[in-house]
Every structure is written in C-alpha cells, then in structure tokens.
Image (cartoon, rainbow, N blue to C red):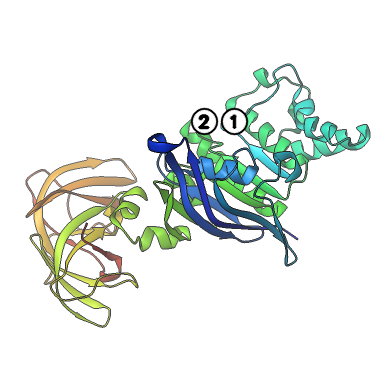
Amino acid sequence: MSVAIAIESLVKVFGSGQAAARAVDGVSLDIEPGELFFLLGPSGCGKTTLLRMVAGFNDPTSGHIKFGRDGQWKDVTHTPPNKRNTGMVFQSYALWPHMSVEANVAFGLGVRKVPADEKTRRALEALTDVQMQAYAKRKPNQLSGGQQQRVALARALVIRPDVLLLDEPLSNLDAKLRNDLRLEIRRICKDSGLTTIYVTHDQKEALSMADRIALLRDGKVVQLGTPKELYRAPKSRFVAEFLGETNLIEAKIASHIDRDMTLDSQAGTIAARAHDHAPTADGSDVLCSLRPEALRITTDGPAGTLRGTVAESTYMGEIAHHLIDLPGHPGVKVSELNPLGATASHAELKPGDRVGLTIDPADVVVLAHE
C-alpha cells in the first residue's frame, strides 16, 4: 500500500535575530497515498525548502513530518535522508558523468547491497519504464536533456521508494519537451502507485499533472485544492492572477438573492453566481475575475452586455487574442477559439470596432477587494 504524508505546523527559519528569514511558515498538509501532489508558487515562496524537509536534507525549526502506511504512522521529522526511503529527482539531474546510464540507475541499489544479478535486472526494468532501455550503455553526455531527465527519474524509481520527490524536474527543458514529458511522468507515477510531491513554479505543469495543488506564497499555503478548484474558484487576487491569465474588474454588489448577484461597474452591469467564499453583502466593493477564454464577443448582445472598443486583435490560427477597451478598464483580454470558423459570431475585428462582451454568471469569480 502507498504511503500517506502528514505535514503538521512545519516551520523553517534561516538565520537568527534581525536577519532571520521564515522560509516556511506553519504549513500543514495531508497528502493521500498514491497522490500526485504539487507544491506551486513563485520563486522564494518556500516550496523547495518544504520539499527538502520532507526529503530530510533540511531540518525543520519546528513542526512534524509523518509517513503513514496501513494506519500506522512514523515521525520522520529528524530522520536522516538515507533512512526515509524517498527517491529524489533534482532540477540538475545530478548524474555521474563517468558512469554508464545503467550504472547511474543502479547506483542506489549498490549502496543498498543488492546482489549484482538483481541490481542489473532492476536497473533495466526501471529504464524500460521510462523508455530508455536502448541507451543503457551510453554515458550521460551522449544524451539529450530530456533523456537525462528520464534517467534521473529511473534512478529514483529503481530503489522502490515509499515517496517520490521531484524538484522542478522539467525546468531546464524546452517547451515542447516539457509538454511531452508531463504526461509521461504522470503515467509513471500513477502506474507505480507512488505518493509523489512535485515542486514547480509552472502553473501549466501543475494544472495538467496534479491530483491536488498547494499554492504557496511567503512560506504559507494560500489555497489548496484540485487544479479545477484553484483555476475556477480562486479565493484571492493572487491565486486568480498566478493561475493563468485573468481580467480584474472593480465592482460593487448591487443586489443578491441566494447565490445570484448583480454587480455594478464602470464597464457595465455584471451578473454573477457566487462561490462559497465570495463576499455577498450589498454595497461591498469587490473584484470580478473574468478569464479571457470565458468572455464571448458579440456585436449586439442582451441586456447586461459589456460594451467597448477593439484596441488590438491578433490572429494565431486556432486561437485569436483580442484586447478590448471597456469604460474604466482598458485592455481587457479575450481569447477566441477557432476565430472566423463556422461558429464565429462576428466578422474579422479591426481596431476601433465597437463590440459587446458577454460571460456566463457561473464564470464570474467574485473576490474581496484588496
């Protein structure tokens, strides 16, 4: 059975006195067995420090880390890294340049005194899992970046760890290779049933791969949930802006009945359906988060349509990006899939054209004004 992880009120302080820096500030997380769990956030938010504490490379200032299996929990807060049975994949690959691919993968098995025949068999099995068995006799410098990353993953998997830890493993690769390896890494993690913690600052990586995401800022978890929950129902301006593009419209709550709200803004009247954490008091100042892909361009829409002027329109084949100037809110971004296709509702847009924007009330995220 896979391992569960409990992180309880974890704190890491570097330095002392006035120079003390609180890199991780009271983080508590429960990670399910077999879950692909992402730590996401901007540089300096504490995600790598948190991962290194789970690995045992950094000792916490306070708090606890526990691994659990079959209802039995073990406190590993101060357990040395080599006693935790975790596999780590680093951003820099960290492969031995003088060793063959096979020898690199088998290195951890040698440390564990695994017999030679079994060591070779398991190393080749791990390379097969990452589709690198044909390169077993090559040296790392004869491989591409993506191939080296696969070898690093095989080396972490071959020891049959209880927990797999990945520290920005795709950040050194080009965009196309990152896209190709995302699904491959997810497949390997899910097929093996490993509990995995994956650190990244790339929101597309997290949205496309994670079971759940903890979004960090200044050492704290600001929101925890599935990719869909974080993207469609952000709890703050920071979350809305960090996870993809959005337009923020200042508004005031004119009225609400249950979850149905009417908002007044300089751009016009906006109908919204409130999420659980949305402010609802009439007269409250709020921010409306409107995703570019949720907005629809129309030449003559129903009452409540936001009306503005085209500032810029960029055709990119399968998608077009528009900037629409609304009263009080210039440069509103609109993304249009299959522009000018059979379902397009308008002719080709030009700067200066008058248009309307509509959006489903369920796609309007109402946030407290910050």
For this orientation, the residue located farthest to the front is: 17
How far separated are the C-alphas under marks 1 and 2?
7 Å
Question: Residue 291, located in which quarter of the rendered image?
Answer: bottom left
Residue 265 visible somewhere in the drawing: yes
Q: Amino acid at mark 1?
A: Gly
Q: Is residue 222 above or below residue 95?
A: below
Question: Residue 99, located in which quarter of the rendered image?
Answer: top right
**Residue 342's spot in the image, x, y percent?**
29, 57
213 displayed left or right of 240: right
Residue located at (74% from left, 39% from top): 82
28 displayed left or right of 42: right
**Residue 93's spot in the image, x, y percent?**
62, 29
Q: Which residue is mark 1?
A: 146
Q: Nearer the viewer, residue 190 or 230?
A: 230
Q: Amino acid at mark 2?
A: Leu
Q: Nearer the viewer, residue 20 or 342?
A: 20
Q: Marks 1 and 2: CB-CB under 8 Å?
A: yes
In the picture, which quadrant includes the N terminus? bottom right
Q: Secondary structure at mark 2?
A: loop
Q: Which residue is mark 2?
A: 173
**Disc 1 packing (10 Å; few <14; some 14–19; many ≥20):** some
Q: Is residue 128 above or below residue 197?
A: above
**Residue 24's spot in the image, x, y percent?**
47, 46
Sequence-first disc among 1 and 2: 1
Residue 184 visible somewhere in the drawing: no
Question: Residue 327, located in which quarter of the rendered image?
Answer: bottom left
**Residue 255's spot in the image, x, y percent?**
15, 78
Q: Secondary structure at mark 1?
A: helix
